[in-house]
Amino acid sequence: MKEIINGLSVFLEGDSKNKSIIFLHGFPYDHTMWKAQIDELSEKYFCVTYDIRGLGESPVGDGQYTMESFVDDLETIIKELKLEKPILCGLSMGGYIGLRALERMEEKFSAAILCDTRADADGNEGKLKRAAAIKRINTEGLAPFAKDFITNCFGDNYKQHNKEEFEKRIAKSSGFNPVGVKGSLLAMLGRNNTTEYLSKIKTPTLVICGENDALTPPAVMKPLAEKINRAEFVIIKNSGHMSPIENPREVNDAITKFLDRL
Ligand code: MLT
């Protein structure tokens, strides 16, 4: 079922009386990246996902977003749907939103699942890369940027064996509004560093990382997990940055085992 909340396209699956999980997608994707998780987990959980402002079906508005405004949107959705301490599950940019949401209002969540993400903010090199991406989108249009960015996200195994799905992902993201994509790049460029908060997290946390993730590799994610009290760290085999799409079986098993233990 789809609902519009504060202008955003929000997708609901499962029985609303069950414990809820709210899924936050990565950049430059949309809610459909969580399909394999929601198909399975919605039998036991109330699964909520949405298109982050500027991406997918959600409105672009003025294209001026901050990580804070993304967290505001998350907070509004939780409030409007009256979700009682949902489990937070975010990948990459969704993880940035999740980590800042924990820092800002940890009491609102009962558990956290952080997939292929990082706590540090963009350094100088990262900021310049975002600026170059915006310039490229302005001069060449969105498609060449989306193709290169998405190609770097997925591991070789997925790209070789799921050519059609992979091409569809690129085509879908290439059709997003460039204003929304550039706004997301600026929001990521301007985000705060949540590393200091990691050691303060009390919420049970699962950290998931694709073994061949080129953007947030295990070398980045293992130390992140080690800073969080009693966090579980799981490496997903045969997977790049998009582990929930690339190896849904292992990701779903890791999530299910973690949630069963709560
Ligand atoms: C994502 O998957 O959300 C992006 O890789 C995040 C980023 O560009 O920092």
Image: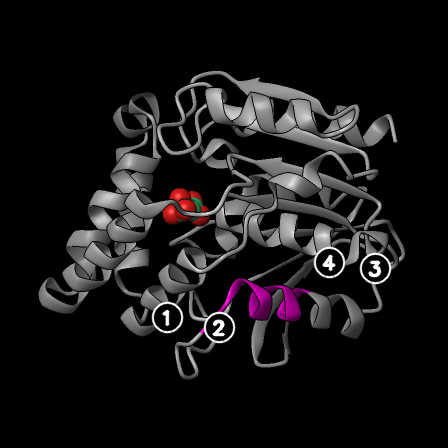
Q: Is mark 2 within 8 Å of ligand 1?
A: no
Q: Could you tell me if the residues under marks 1 and 2 are in contact, i.e. CB atoms within 8 Å?
A: yes
Closer-to-camera residue (53/124): 124
Could one spot residue 249 in this view of the protein?
no
> Are there few (<14), some (14-19), or many (20+) residues within 10 Å of tag 1?
many
Q: Which residue is identified by label 3?
A: 16
Q: Which residue is identified by label 4?
A: 104
In the rendered structure, find residue 58 and report the number of the disc placed on it: 2
Q: Residue 68 in the image: x percent, y percent?
A: 59, 66
Q: Nearer the viewer, mark 2 or mark 4?
A: 4
Closer-to-camera residue (107/6): 107
Q: Which residue is identified by label 1?
A: 180
Image vertical order of residue 103 relative to residue 41, above or below: below
Image vertical order of residue 104 relative to residue 110, above or below: below
Mark 1 to mark 2 CA distance (whole Å): 9 Å
Locate residue 261 relative to residue 70 in the image: left or right: right
In terms of secondary structure, where does tag 2 sit? loop
Magenta region, residue range: 65-74
Mark 3 to mark 1 CA distance (whole Å): 30 Å
Q: Nearer the viewer, mark 3 or mark 2?
A: 2
> Are there few (<14), some (14-19), or many (20+) residues within 10 Å of tag 2?
many
The amino acid type found where label 3 is placed reads Ser
